[in-house]
Image (spheres, coloured by chain):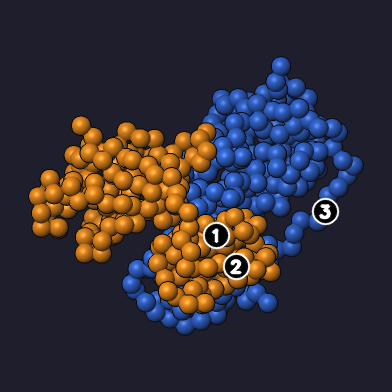
Chain colours: A blue, B orange
Protein backbone atom coordinates (compact mmCIF):
# COMPACT_ATOMS: atom_id res chain seq x y z
CA UNK A 1 0.00 0.00 0.00
CA UNK A 2 1.45 3.36 -0.92
CA UNK A 3 1.44 6.36 1.33
CA UNK A 4 -0.50 9.39 0.15
CA UNK A 5 -0.06 13.11 0.71
CA UNK A 6 -3.40 14.91 0.50
CA UNK A 7 -3.42 18.61 -0.35
CA UNK A 8 -5.85 20.53 1.89
CA UNK A 9 -4.92 24.07 0.71
CA UNK A 10 -2.33 25.44 -1.73
CA UNK A 11 -1.90 29.18 -1.30
CA UNK A 12 -0.85 31.13 -4.42
CA UNK A 13 1.10 28.40 -6.22
CA UNK A 14 2.57 25.09 -5.11
CA UNK A 15 4.48 22.86 -7.52
CA UNK A 16 6.31 19.55 -7.31
CA UNK A 17 10.04 20.18 -7.84
CA UNK A 18 13.28 18.23 -7.80
CA UNK A 19 16.65 19.00 -9.44
CA UNK A 20 15.00 19.47 -12.84
CA UNK A 21 15.70 17.95 -16.25
CA UNK A 22 18.98 19.34 -17.62
CA UNK A 23 20.41 17.78 -20.77
CA UNK A 24 17.39 18.26 -23.06
CA UNK A 25 17.81 21.96 -23.88
CA UNK A 26 18.63 21.11 -27.53
CA UNK A 27 15.11 19.65 -27.81
CA UNK A 28 13.58 22.86 -26.48
CA UNK A 29 13.07 21.46 -22.97
CA UNK A 30 13.63 23.96 -20.13
CA UNK A 31 15.76 22.82 -17.19
CA UNK A 32 13.09 23.52 -14.54
CA UNK A 33 13.68 22.28 -10.95
CA UNK A 34 13.58 24.03 -7.56
CA UNK A 35 14.34 27.76 -7.89
CA UNK A 36 16.05 27.89 -4.48
CA UNK A 37 18.09 24.74 -5.05
CA UNK A 38 20.10 24.92 -1.77
CA UNK A 39 16.87 25.18 0.27
CA UNK A 40 15.33 22.27 -1.63
CA UNK A 41 18.47 20.15 -1.12
CA UNK A 42 18.61 20.96 2.60
CA UNK A 43 14.99 19.91 3.12
CA UNK A 44 15.60 16.61 1.34
CA UNK A 45 18.77 15.94 3.37
CA UNK A 46 17.02 16.73 6.65
CA UNK A 47 14.45 13.96 6.11
CA UNK A 48 17.04 11.46 4.85
CA UNK A 49 16.13 11.57 1.16
CA UNK A 50 18.49 11.53 -1.80
CA UNK A 51 19.07 15.05 -3.17
CA UNK A 52 17.17 14.15 -6.34
CA UNK A 53 13.95 13.37 -4.43
CA UNK A 54 10.90 15.51 -5.19
CA UNK A 55 9.18 17.85 -2.77
CA UNK A 56 6.90 20.88 -2.94
CA UNK A 57 7.90 24.45 -3.76
CA UNK A 58 5.41 26.82 -2.14
CA UNK A 59 4.99 30.44 -3.25
CA UNK A 60 4.19 32.80 -0.33
CA UNK A 61 3.00 30.05 2.04
CA UNK A 62 -0.59 28.99 2.56
CA UNK A 63 -0.01 25.26 2.00
CA UNK A 64 -1.77 22.66 4.13
CA UNK A 65 -1.21 18.92 3.67
CA UNK A 66 -1.90 15.65 5.48
CA UNK A 67 -0.36 12.18 5.24
CA UNK A 68 -2.05 8.85 5.84
CA UNK A 69 1.05 7.42 7.54
CA UNK A 70 3.59 8.86 10.04
CA UNK A 71 6.54 10.48 8.27
CA UNK A 72 9.43 12.88 8.80
CA UNK A 73 8.95 16.22 7.10
CA UNK A 74 11.16 19.33 6.83
CA UNK A 75 10.39 22.88 5.74
CA UNK A 76 13.15 25.22 4.48
CA UNK A 77 13.59 28.34 2.35
CA UNK A 78 11.49 31.41 3.11
CA UNK A 79 10.79 31.29 6.86
CA UNK A 80 7.10 30.57 7.63
CA UNK A 81 5.11 29.94 10.81
CA UNK A 82 4.71 26.13 10.79
CA UNK A 83 2.16 24.01 12.63
CA UNK A 84 1.56 20.29 13.09
CA UNK A 85 -2.09 20.19 14.09
CA UNK A 86 -2.36 23.05 16.60
CA UNK A 87 1.26 22.83 17.71
CA UNK A 88 3.90 25.28 16.46
CA UNK A 89 7.00 23.44 15.20
CA UNK A 90 10.36 24.68 13.96
CA UNK A 91 11.41 24.98 10.33
CA UNK A 92 14.88 23.97 9.16
CA UNK A 93 14.86 20.57 10.85
CA UNK A 94 13.16 17.20 10.57
CA UNK A 95 9.75 17.11 12.28
CA UNK A 96 7.63 14.00 12.84
CA UNK A 97 4.24 14.42 11.17
CA UNK A 98 1.73 11.91 12.58
CA UNK A 99 -0.77 10.28 10.21
CA UNK A 100 -3.96 12.25 9.47
CA UNK A 101 -2.63 15.43 11.14
CA UNK A 102 -2.53 18.64 9.09
CA UNK A 103 0.81 20.33 8.46
CA UNK A 104 0.16 24.05 7.90
CA UNK A 105 2.51 26.64 6.41
CA UNK A 106 1.68 30.26 7.29
CA UNK A 107 2.74 33.29 5.27
CA UNK A 108 6.46 34.14 5.15
CA UNK A 109 7.42 37.49 6.71
CA UNK A 110 10.22 37.80 4.19
CA UNK A 111 11.35 35.74 1.24
CA UNK A 112 9.08 34.13 -1.28
CA UNK A 113 9.49 30.39 -1.74
CA UNK A 114 9.34 27.68 0.93
CA UNK A 115 10.26 24.01 0.41
CA UNK A 116 8.60 20.95 1.92
CA UNK A 117 10.29 17.55 1.92
CA UNK A 118 8.62 14.30 3.05
CA UNK A 119 10.70 11.23 3.89
CA UNK A 120 10.40 8.86 0.93
CA UNK A 121 9.87 11.77 -1.51
CA UNK A 122 6.90 12.52 -3.77
CA UNK A 123 6.52 9.84 -6.43
CA UNK A 124 4.48 11.55 -9.15
CA UNK A 125 5.32 10.19 -12.62
CA UNK A 126 8.68 11.47 -13.87
CA UNK A 127 8.99 13.07 -17.33
CA UNK A 128 12.45 12.88 -18.95
CA UNK A 129 13.96 11.83 -15.63
CA UNK A 130 12.42 14.58 -13.49
CA UNK A 131 9.24 15.15 -11.48
CA UNK A 132 9.54 18.94 -11.72
CA UNK A 133 6.55 20.97 -12.87
CA UNK A 134 7.71 23.21 -15.72
CA UNK A 135 5.43 26.24 -15.77
CA UNK A 136 6.63 27.37 -19.23
CA UNK A 137 6.28 24.18 -21.28
CA UNK A 138 3.75 22.32 -19.12
CA UNK A 139 6.04 19.27 -18.83
CA UNK A 140 5.76 17.35 -15.56
CA UNK A 141 2.85 17.46 -13.13
CA UNK A 142 0.38 20.35 -13.06
CA UNK A 143 0.61 22.76 -10.11
CA UNK A 144 -0.98 21.03 -7.11
CA UNK A 145 -4.64 21.75 -6.36
CA UNK A 146 -6.71 21.38 -3.23
CA UNK A 147 -7.85 17.77 -3.03
CA UNK A 148 -4.87 16.35 -4.96
CA UNK A 149 -3.51 13.08 -3.62
CA UNK A 150 0.21 12.62 -4.31
CA UNK A 151 1.98 9.26 -3.86
CA UNK A 152 4.86 9.21 -1.34
CA UNK A 153 7.78 6.75 -1.56
CA UNK A 154 9.28 4.43 1.03
CA UNK A 155 11.84 6.17 3.28
CA UNK A 156 15.43 5.03 2.75
CA UNK A 157 16.06 5.20 6.51
CA UNK A 158 15.85 7.49 9.50
CA UNK A 159 16.97 11.12 9.03
CA UNK A 160 20.59 11.86 9.78
CA UNK A 161 21.46 13.29 13.19
CA UNK A 162 20.98 17.04 13.54
CA UNK A 163 22.60 18.62 10.54
CA UNK A 164 21.56 22.21 10.08
CA UNK A 165 24.13 24.18 8.11
CA UNK A 166 23.78 27.95 8.25
CA UNK A 167 21.67 29.18 5.34
CA UNK A 168 23.77 30.66 2.53
CA UNK A 169 24.57 34.33 3.14
CA UNK A 170 22.43 36.98 1.47
CA UNK A 171 24.03 39.68 -0.64
CA UNK A 172 24.07 41.28 -4.07
CA UNK A 173 23.81 39.14 -7.21
CA UNK A 174 27.25 38.70 -8.78
CA UNK A 175 27.25 39.58 -12.48
CA UNK A 176 29.46 38.30 -15.27
CA UNK A 177 29.72 39.97 -18.67
CA UNK A 178 27.18 38.47 -21.08
CA UNK A 179 27.88 37.20 -24.61
CA UNK A 180 25.96 40.15 -26.14
CA UNK A 181 27.15 42.88 -23.75
CA UNK A 182 27.93 45.04 -26.79
CA UNK A 183 24.21 45.26 -27.62
CA UNK A 184 23.85 47.50 -24.57
CA UNK A 185 24.83 51.15 -25.00
CA UNK A 186 27.47 51.38 -22.25
CA UNK A 187 28.93 48.77 -19.90
CA UNK A 188 25.95 46.52 -19.11
CA UNK A 189 27.40 45.15 -15.86
CA UNK A 190 28.29 48.66 -14.70
CA UNK A 191 24.81 50.00 -15.54
CA UNK A 192 23.18 47.11 -13.69
CA UNK A 193 25.46 47.56 -10.64
CA UNK A 194 24.83 51.33 -10.45
CA UNK A 195 21.10 51.22 -11.23
CA UNK A 196 18.26 51.15 -8.68
CA UNK A 197 16.31 47.96 -9.43
CA UNK A 198 13.42 46.17 -7.85
CA UNK A 199 11.60 42.89 -8.43
CA UNK A 200 8.63 43.37 -10.80
CA UNK A 201 5.20 41.90 -9.89
CA UNK A 202 5.20 39.74 -13.03
CA UNK A 203 8.35 37.88 -11.96
CA UNK A 204 7.86 34.10 -11.90
CA UNK A 205 9.65 30.78 -12.33
CA UNK A 206 10.59 31.80 -15.90
CA UNK A 207 12.34 35.03 -14.99
CA UNK A 208 13.05 37.72 -12.45
CA UNK A 209 11.84 40.89 -14.16
CA UNK A 210 13.49 44.13 -13.11
CA UNK A 211 11.87 47.51 -12.51
CA UNK A 212 14.18 50.50 -12.98
CA UNK A 213 15.44 52.91 -15.61
CA UNK A 214 15.52 50.90 -18.86
CA UNK A 215 18.99 49.99 -20.14
CA UNK A 216 19.79 51.74 -23.44
CA UNK A 217 20.30 49.41 -26.39
CA UNK A 218 23.13 50.05 -28.83
CA UNK A 219 21.44 47.96 -31.52
CA UNK A 220 17.80 47.47 -32.34
CA UNK A 221 18.00 44.76 -35.00
CA UNK A 222 16.93 41.21 -34.23
CA UNK A 223 19.46 38.70 -32.94
CA UNK A 224 19.38 35.25 -34.57
CA UNK A 225 17.99 32.73 -32.05
CA UNK A 226 20.69 31.28 -29.80
CA UNK A 227 20.98 29.08 -26.72
CA UNK A 228 20.46 30.88 -23.40
CA UNK A 229 21.97 29.91 -20.02
CA UNK A 230 20.27 29.81 -16.64
CA UNK A 231 20.89 33.20 -15.00
CA UNK A 232 21.15 35.05 -18.33
CA UNK A 233 20.19 38.73 -18.10
CA UNK A 234 18.23 39.28 -21.28
CA UNK A 235 17.55 42.75 -22.65
CA UNK A 236 14.25 42.96 -24.57
CA UNK A 237 13.54 45.94 -26.86
CA UNK A 238 11.81 47.83 -24.00
CA UNK A 239 15.11 47.87 -22.06
CA UNK A 240 13.65 46.14 -18.97
CA UNK A 241 16.13 43.38 -18.08
CA UNK A 242 14.94 39.86 -17.24
CA UNK A 243 17.05 37.34 -15.28
CA UNK A 244 16.25 33.88 -16.64
CA UNK A 245 15.33 31.35 -13.96
CA UNK A 246 14.72 27.57 -14.06
CA UNK A 247 11.71 27.50 -16.44
CA UNK A 248 13.34 29.84 -19.01
CA UNK A 249 13.05 29.16 -22.77
CA UNK A 250 16.12 27.30 -24.09
CA UNK A 251 16.78 29.63 -27.02
CA UNK A 252 16.03 33.32 -27.45
CA UNK A 253 16.34 36.21 -29.85
CA UNK A 254 17.01 39.02 -27.37
CA UNK A 255 20.62 39.85 -26.41
CA UNK A 256 22.05 38.45 -23.16
CA UNK A 257 24.08 41.37 -21.78
CA UNK A 258 25.11 39.84 -18.43
CA UNK A 259 24.94 36.53 -16.55
CA UNK A 260 24.13 36.11 -12.83
CA UNK A 261 26.56 33.77 -11.08
CA UNK A 262 24.89 30.33 -10.73
CA UNK A 263 25.73 30.27 -7.00
CA UNK A 264 23.55 33.37 -6.46
CA UNK A 265 20.42 32.26 -8.34
CA UNK A 266 18.72 31.02 -5.16
CA UNK A 267 18.51 34.64 -4.03
CA UNK A 268 16.39 35.47 -7.08
CA UNK A 269 13.94 32.79 -5.92
CA UNK A 270 13.42 34.61 -2.64
CA UNK A 271 12.77 38.12 -3.99
CA UNK A 272 9.23 39.44 -3.67
CA UNK A 273 7.61 42.03 -5.90
CA UNK A 274 8.94 45.43 -4.79
CA UNK A 275 12.05 44.01 -3.09
CA UNK A 276 15.25 45.84 -4.09
CA UNK A 277 17.54 43.87 -6.44
CA UNK A 278 21.24 44.64 -6.01
CA UNK A 279 24.08 43.60 -8.29
CA UNK A 280 27.83 43.55 -7.98
CA UNK A 281 30.53 42.74 -10.54
CA UNK A 282 31.77 39.14 -10.21
CA UNK A 283 35.48 38.77 -9.60
CA UNK B 1 36.06 26.52 -46.44
CA UNK B 2 36.38 28.63 -43.31
CA UNK B 3 39.94 27.79 -42.28
CA UNK B 4 41.17 26.82 -38.82
CA UNK B 5 39.26 29.47 -36.86
CA UNK B 6 35.79 28.30 -37.90
CA UNK B 7 34.29 29.32 -34.58
CA UNK B 8 34.59 32.31 -32.29
CA UNK B 9 34.15 31.64 -28.54
CA UNK B 10 32.30 34.13 -26.32
CA UNK B 11 32.07 33.69 -22.54
CA UNK B 12 28.59 33.17 -21.18
CA UNK B 13 29.08 33.36 -17.42
CA UNK B 14 31.45 31.13 -15.43
CA UNK B 15 30.30 27.74 -16.76
CA UNK B 16 29.21 28.18 -20.38
CA UNK B 17 30.68 29.18 -23.71
CA UNK B 18 28.84 30.45 -26.79
CA UNK B 19 30.58 29.41 -30.02
CA UNK B 20 29.78 31.67 -32.98
CA UNK B 21 29.89 30.04 -36.41
CA UNK B 22 28.97 31.00 -39.98
CA UNK B 23 25.48 29.54 -40.31
CA UNK B 24 22.89 27.02 -39.10
CA UNK B 25 24.42 24.07 -40.96
CA UNK B 26 27.83 24.68 -39.34
CA UNK B 27 26.22 25.16 -35.93
CA UNK B 28 24.45 21.83 -36.28
CA UNK B 29 27.65 20.06 -37.37
CA UNK B 30 29.63 21.51 -34.45
CA UNK B 31 26.86 20.69 -31.95
CA UNK B 32 26.68 17.08 -33.16
CA UNK B 33 30.49 16.79 -32.90
CA UNK B 34 30.53 18.18 -29.35
CA UNK B 35 27.55 16.09 -28.22
CA UNK B 36 29.58 12.90 -28.74
CA UNK B 37 33.06 14.16 -27.84
CA UNK B 38 32.63 16.23 -24.68
CA UNK B 39 30.87 15.68 -21.36
CA UNK B 40 28.58 18.72 -21.01
CA UNK B 41 25.30 19.44 -19.22
CA UNK B 42 23.78 20.88 -22.40
CA UNK B 43 24.92 21.44 -26.00
CA UNK B 44 22.43 23.77 -27.71
CA UNK B 45 22.72 24.70 -31.39
CA UNK B 46 21.18 27.99 -32.53
CA UNK B 47 20.84 29.78 -35.85
CA UNK B 48 24.53 30.79 -35.90
CA UNK B 49 25.88 29.59 -32.54
CA UNK B 50 26.41 26.57 -30.29
CA UNK B 51 25.99 27.00 -26.53
CA UNK B 52 28.07 24.57 -24.45
CA UNK B 53 27.00 24.59 -20.81
CA UNK B 54 28.75 22.75 -17.98
CA UNK B 55 31.77 21.31 -19.83
CA UNK B 56 35.26 21.25 -18.31
CA UNK B 57 37.26 23.90 -20.23
CA UNK B 58 40.20 21.57 -20.95
CA UNK B 59 37.93 18.81 -22.29
CA UNK B 60 36.01 21.32 -24.41
CA UNK B 61 39.26 22.75 -25.79
CA UNK B 62 40.45 19.28 -26.74
CA UNK B 63 37.15 18.42 -28.42
CA UNK B 64 37.18 21.71 -30.37
CA UNK B 65 40.73 21.07 -31.58
CA UNK B 66 39.54 17.76 -33.02
CA UNK B 67 36.64 19.35 -34.95
CA UNK B 68 37.08 19.52 -38.71
CA UNK B 69 34.51 21.95 -40.13
CA UNK B 70 35.11 20.51 -43.60
CA UNK B 71 33.65 17.16 -42.57
CA UNK B 72 29.87 16.99 -42.90
CA UNK B 73 28.04 15.36 -40.00
CA UNK B 74 26.41 11.99 -40.75
CA UNK B 75 22.93 12.29 -42.26
CA UNK B 76 20.21 12.27 -39.64
CA UNK B 77 17.04 10.20 -40.00
CA UNK B 78 14.61 11.20 -42.76
CA UNK B 79 11.06 12.08 -41.71
CA UNK B 80 8.28 12.57 -44.24
CA UNK B 81 5.57 14.90 -42.93
CA UNK B 82 2.14 14.52 -44.57
CA UNK B 83 0.39 17.90 -44.72
CA UNK B 84 -3.14 19.02 -45.51
CA UNK B 85 -2.44 22.39 -47.12
CA UNK B 86 -5.42 24.41 -45.93
CA UNK B 87 -3.65 26.93 -43.66
CA UNK B 88 -5.09 30.37 -42.93
CA UNK B 89 -2.01 32.11 -44.41
CA UNK B 90 -1.61 30.04 -47.59
CA UNK B 91 -3.03 32.90 -49.70
CA UNK B 92 -0.84 35.56 -48.04
CA UNK B 93 2.28 33.45 -48.65
CA UNK B 94 1.24 33.02 -52.29
CA UNK B 95 0.90 36.79 -52.53
CA UNK B 96 4.36 37.33 -50.96
CA UNK B 97 5.89 34.81 -53.34
CA UNK B 98 3.93 36.14 -56.34
CA UNK B 99 2.51 32.74 -57.22
CA UNK B 100 -0.65 30.65 -56.85
CA UNK B 101 -1.49 28.71 -53.69
CA UNK B 102 -1.00 25.55 -55.76
CA UNK B 103 2.57 26.66 -56.48
CA UNK B 104 3.15 27.37 -52.76
CA UNK B 105 2.29 23.71 -52.06
CA UNK B 106 4.57 22.54 -54.86
CA UNK B 107 7.48 24.67 -53.64
CA UNK B 108 7.05 23.64 -50.00
CA UNK B 109 6.88 19.93 -50.85
CA UNK B 110 9.99 20.20 -53.06
CA UNK B 111 12.26 21.39 -50.24
CA UNK B 112 14.95 19.20 -48.62
CA UNK B 113 14.93 20.57 -45.06
CA UNK B 114 17.03 19.87 -41.97
CA UNK B 115 16.13 20.42 -38.33
CA UNK B 116 18.79 22.96 -37.34
CA UNK B 117 17.79 23.58 -33.72
CA UNK B 118 14.86 23.49 -31.31
CA UNK B 119 13.40 26.19 -29.10
CA UNK B 120 10.21 28.05 -28.23
CA UNK B 121 8.58 24.82 -26.97
CA UNK B 122 9.65 21.20 -26.45
CA UNK B 123 10.01 19.62 -29.91
CA UNK B 124 9.56 22.91 -31.83
CA UNK B 125 12.20 22.48 -34.56
CA UNK B 126 13.54 25.27 -36.76
CA UNK B 127 13.85 23.63 -40.21
CA UNK B 128 16.43 25.20 -42.52
CA UNK B 129 16.44 24.95 -46.29
CA UNK B 130 14.01 27.60 -47.54
CA UNK B 131 15.89 29.85 -50.01
CA UNK B 132 16.58 33.40 -48.80
CA UNK B 133 14.47 34.91 -51.60
CA UNK B 134 11.40 33.07 -50.28
CA UNK B 135 11.76 34.44 -46.74
CA UNK B 136 8.42 35.64 -45.32
CA UNK B 137 7.91 38.07 -42.44
CA UNK B 138 6.12 36.98 -39.28
CA UNK B 139 2.53 38.11 -38.79
CA UNK B 140 2.21 41.67 -37.49
CA UNK B 141 0.25 40.42 -34.51
CA UNK B 142 0.63 36.81 -33.32
CA UNK B 143 -2.40 34.53 -33.06
CA UNK B 144 -3.37 33.77 -29.48
CA UNK B 145 -3.75 30.08 -30.29
CA UNK B 146 -2.19 27.98 -33.04
CA UNK B 147 -3.30 24.31 -32.99
CA UNK B 148 -0.81 21.45 -32.53
CA UNK B 149 0.36 20.06 -35.87
CA UNK B 150 0.19 23.42 -37.65
CA UNK B 151 2.77 23.66 -40.46
CA UNK B 152 4.16 27.19 -40.72
CA UNK B 153 6.79 29.55 -42.14
CA UNK B 154 8.68 32.55 -40.71
CA UNK B 155 11.80 34.12 -42.20
CA UNK B 156 13.59 31.28 -43.97
CA UNK B 157 12.43 28.77 -41.34
CA UNK B 158 9.76 26.10 -41.62
CA UNK B 159 8.25 24.50 -38.51
CA UNK B 160 5.50 22.31 -37.18
CA UNK B 161 3.88 23.38 -33.89
CA UNK B 162 4.26 20.39 -31.51
CA UNK B 163 1.64 21.70 -29.08
CA UNK B 164 -1.09 24.32 -29.20
CA UNK B 165 0.38 27.72 -28.34
CA UNK B 166 0.31 31.38 -29.31
CA UNK B 167 2.27 31.97 -32.51
CA UNK B 168 3.19 34.54 -35.14
CA UNK B 169 4.27 32.22 -37.97
CA UNK B 170 2.36 31.98 -41.27
CA UNK B 171 0.23 28.85 -41.38
CA UNK B 172 0.37 26.71 -44.53
CA UNK B 173 -1.46 23.61 -43.31
CA UNK B 174 -1.58 20.85 -40.71
CA UNK B 175 -0.24 17.35 -40.06
CA UNK B 176 -1.48 14.44 -37.95
CA UNK B 177 2.03 13.41 -36.90
CA UNK B 178 2.85 13.54 -33.18
CA UNK B 179 5.78 15.94 -32.95
CA UNK B 180 6.42 15.51 -29.24
CA UNK B 181 5.96 12.46 -27.01
CA UNK B 182 8.00 12.39 -23.81
CA UNK B 183 7.71 8.57 -23.67
CA UNK B 184 9.46 8.27 -27.06
CA UNK B 185 13.26 8.27 -27.60
CA UNK B 186 14.05 10.91 -28.63
CA UNK B 187 10.84 12.63 -27.55
CA UNK B 188 11.15 15.20 -30.34
CA UNK B 189 10.26 13.74 -33.77
CA UNK B 190 12.33 16.46 -35.46
CA UNK B 191 15.40 16.53 -33.17
CA UNK B 192 18.34 18.59 -34.52
CA UNK B 193 19.94 16.85 -37.50
CA UNK B 194 16.71 15.18 -38.68
CA UNK B 195 16.09 15.58 -42.43
CA UNK B 196 12.54 16.58 -43.29
CA UNK B 197 10.37 16.59 -46.40
CA UNK B 198 6.77 17.74 -46.53
CA UNK B 199 4.32 15.73 -48.65
CA UNK B 200 0.80 16.69 -49.60
CA UNK B 201 -1.73 14.45 -47.84
CA UNK B 202 -4.74 13.35 -49.89
Q: Nearer the viewer, residue B182 or B131?
A: B131
The nearer-to-camera label among 3 and 1 is 1
Q: Chain of mark 1?
A: B
Image height of A16 relative to A165, above or below: above
Estimate how packed mark 3 is, as few (under 14), some (14 to 19) or many (20 or more) residues with alpha carbons within 10 Å. Answer: few
Q: Is residue A130 visible?
A: yes
Name the residue at 71% across, 16% down.
Answer: A1
Q: Report whether A253 appears left or right of B140.
A: right
Q: Are marks 3 and 1 in contact (CB under 8 Å)?
A: no
Image mark for residue B66: 2
Q: CA distance from mark 3 to mark 1?
A: 42 Å
**Both on one chain, marks 3 and 2?**
no
Q: Is residue B141 visible?
A: no
Residue A36 x, y percent position in the rendering = 65, 52
Q: Which residue is mark 1?
A: B33
Q: Which residue is mark 3?
A: A165
Provide the secondary structure element on which disc 1 rests: helix
Residue with the most extreme top position:
A1
Quadrant of image for the C terminus of chain A:
bottom right
Image mark for residue A180: none
Mark 2 vs mark 1: which is more N-terminal? 1
Provide the secondary structure element on which disc 3 rests: loop
Amino acid sequence: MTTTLTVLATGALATVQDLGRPGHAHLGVPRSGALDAPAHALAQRLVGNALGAAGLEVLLGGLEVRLDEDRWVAVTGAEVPLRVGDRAVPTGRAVRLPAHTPLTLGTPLRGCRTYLAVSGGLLVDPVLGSRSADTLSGLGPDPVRTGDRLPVGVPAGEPAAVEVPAPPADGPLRLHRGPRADWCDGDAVDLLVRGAWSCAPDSDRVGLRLVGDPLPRARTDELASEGVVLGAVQLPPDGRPVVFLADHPTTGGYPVVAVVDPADLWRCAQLRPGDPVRFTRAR
Amino acid sequence: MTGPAAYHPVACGPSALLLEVADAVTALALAEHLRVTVDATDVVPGARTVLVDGAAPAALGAALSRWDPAVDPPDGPLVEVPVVYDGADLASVAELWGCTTREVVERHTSLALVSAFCGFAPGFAYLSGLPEEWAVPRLDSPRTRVPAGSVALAGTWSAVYPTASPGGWRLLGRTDLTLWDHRRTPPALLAPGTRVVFREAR
